[in-house]
Amino acid sequence: MLLNIQDYRRQAQRRLPRFVFDYIDGGAEDERCLQRNGSDLAAIHLLPTCLRDTHAIDTSTEVFGRRWQAPFAVAPIGLCGLVRPGGDMMMAQAAAAAGVPFILSTASNTRLEDLRQTSAPWLQWMQVYVMSERSIAEQIVRRAKAAKFGALVLTVDVPVSGARERDWRNHFKLPFRPTPAIALDLLRHPGWLWRVLRQGAPSFVNMSEENTAGSAEVQAALLAREMDRRLDWDSLRWLRGLWDGPLLLKGLLHPADARRAVAHGVDGVIVSNHGGRQLDVAPSSIAALPGIVDAVAGRLPIFVDGGFRRGSDVVKALALGAKGVLLGRPPVYGLASNGQQGTAAVLGLLREELERSMTLLGTACISDIGRHHLMNDSHPS
Ligand SMILES: Cc1cc2nc3c(=O)[nH]c(=O)nc-3n(C[C@H](O)[C@H](O)[C@H](O)COP(=O)(O)O)c2cc1C
């Protein structure tokens, strides 16, 4: 029975070859940051209020002038096509049906123009990684603008890849050469293997304007997350020259960086430690959130991701001042379990949990949620 996100996680583990599951599920080094994302959220307690009219719960919220049906969006996930061929499209359609945005990764396996045809522009955002060959990011941003994506998300927490030891142990790198252990594991997952054999192994199709996957070196560098380490605050001017829509920075944890983001005229920030996949000694996102809320002082919408597995977790972020939450692994666990329907089920489940939590808290709408719902001694700031 799939009752909660942990059930979907276990289902994904059963359905996927180990190297694929580990790629999704894993974190960096000792995976302490990954654990902290969950345990710091669990340590926060919410104080319910009673005798409030909650007969009609409204989970919708307004972001950049548009109404999201719930205060969450699907985070950018690279290499979804490895989980399911066509995975980006399936997740985007599930998100659109739920009335929440989907963020397409630079490392996706679906041409951004193809994805754009599936739903309204404001429901689709484009994430950009800046690799040493800056022309790759430039053409992505130009195409995203031409295709009318609703917002651009610059990920700033990957100057190099975190030490993903699970991937190293599984020899998961390009060019991919299955070890005998991996070959055996693939045979144990005939459903996954059949789909990949029938529909083809995924490739990074957004690396060039002409529908090509880019050179083998570029592909390997993207999988190894070799980025432009010269990227700095001044580089935002270069990006602004290419993109005039909403621009968000994803991967901030330091309040000083949030102040800089305001000064540089970005339109939103995403507090994130990349799901515990980068700096293992970084704080949990939920612990970093209050410092950023104070630094930004209402001048920008703040989003947060990392470890959100219950509707009540989403309420905690909102109570601490976030506008919304990004969901990383949960929609992918759904995708692995049952394709588009699986992701749709995960988004539906979290929305139901959110509604129930709001009812129990005595909050009929999102704007009713606030700091007064936090137990003073339980939030981790
Ligand atoms: C398998 C996987 C691939 C990811 N790929 C990207 C990516 O391409 N770009 C990006 O900005 N973040 C990427 N992330 C980070 C997510 O966008 C998000 O920050 C993180 O997963 C949130 O934590 P959660 O998984 O606990 O919800 C990836 C995360 C995972 C698990």
Image: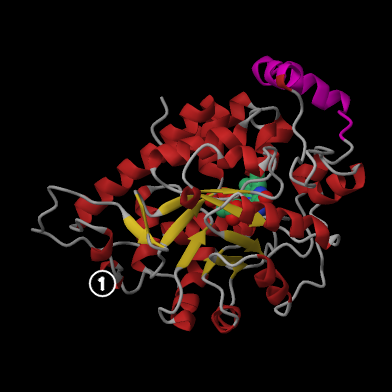
The residue sitting at 33% across, 57% down in the picture is: 61
Task: Kindly report the secondary structure that dominates the magenta region of the rendered protein.
Answer: helix
The answer to whether 88 appears left or right of 46 in the picture is right
List x then y, in percent, for residue 161: 77, 57
Q: Which residue is mark 1?
A: 372
Q: Is residue 169 above or below residue 70?
A: above
User: Which quadrant, please, contains the N terminus?
Assistant: top left
Decide if ligand 1 comes within 8 Å of the CB at mark 1. no
Q: Is residue 195 above or below residue 144?
A: above
List x then y, in percent, for residue 155: 66, 62
The answer to whether 308 appears left or right of 67 in the picture is right
User: Which quadrant, please, contains the C terminus?
Assistant: bottom left
Which structural element holds mark 1? helix
Asked whether residue 276 is in view, the answer is: no
List x then y, in percent, for residue 11: 53, 28
- Name which quarter of the figure residue 65 lies in: bottom left
Foreground of the two, 315 or 299:
299
The residue sitting at 82% across, 59% down in the picture is: 135
List x then y, in percent, for residue 273: 61, 62
Asked whether residue 167 is in view, the answer is: yes
Number of disc labels: 1
The residue sitting at 59% across, 77% down in the picture is: 254
The residue segment tinted magenta is 176-198
- Name which quarter of the figure residue 184 lies in: top right
